[in-house]
Image (tube, helix red, strand yellow):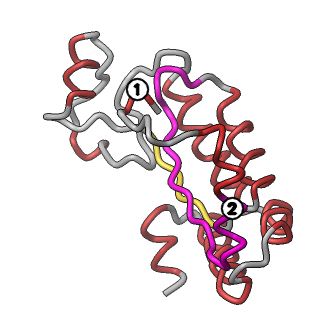
Amino acid sequence: MDGVRKGFNRVEEYVRVIEHIHEHGIAVQAGIVFGFDQDTESIFSETLDFLETAGVQNATFNILTPYPGTPLYQRLETEGRILTRDWSKYNGREDVVFQPLHLSPETLRDGYRYANRRFYSGASVFRRLTHSPVGLWWTLPLNLAYAFALRSGQQGETAARAIR
């Protein structure tokens, strides 16, 4: 979190914070970004293990994308790690536009896909939602809609439209 100036996020406190939120009847929607310099292949399964154990109801996964004009883009460009300037690939969901430090671009993309498939699998939905039945009446249909959209080959916003 320090690398993205989010030192206020205390990872070691996440489980306790999520439990506290659930105690107040509030569901948790996590936003996860993969591809930071410290990420290795284990980040995908470790993240999913945590989300399932903590009973996080919903999550959105993204691939780190260094947009032009940002400090991240400038740093990666200086380091020679920008792979393309085809701006249509700067989507955060399907394309990796930079060379990750400890992963191949293909491993990052495949890990992102794995996270979506696993998180919205029947087994994961069951594990997560039985840990916290907060808002089960709306979180279960939402999870099922995302799972259906992923199986249909839809991603991101298309999955969100499928549940509206």
Report the amino acid beneath label 2: Val
Q: CA distance from mark 1 to mark 2?
A: 24 Å
Q: In percent of the image, x 67 and y 68: which residue is there?
A: 57
Examine the rendered structure and indicate whether residue 100 appears above or below residue 140.
Answer: above
Which range is magenta?
18-39
Foreground: 132 or 93?
Answer: 132
Residue 79: percent from left, percent from top = 28, 10
Q: In percent of the image, x 32 and y 16: which residue is there?
A: 81
**Disc number placed over residue 56 in the picture, else none:** 2
Examine the rendered structure and indicate whether residue 36 appears above or below residue 102.
Answer: below
Q: Secondary structure at mark 2?
A: loop
Q: Quadrant of residue 74?
A: top left
Examine the rendered structure and indicate whether residue 141 appears above or below residue 131.
Answer: below
The reply to whether the magenta stretch includes residue 92 is no
Foreground: 33 or 162?
Answer: 33
Q: Residue furthest left?
A: 69
Q: Which residue is mark 1?
A: 3
Residue 62: percent from left, percent from top = 47, 48
Residue 123: percent from left, percent from top = 86, 62
Q: In the visual, does 94 lie left or right of 86?
A: right
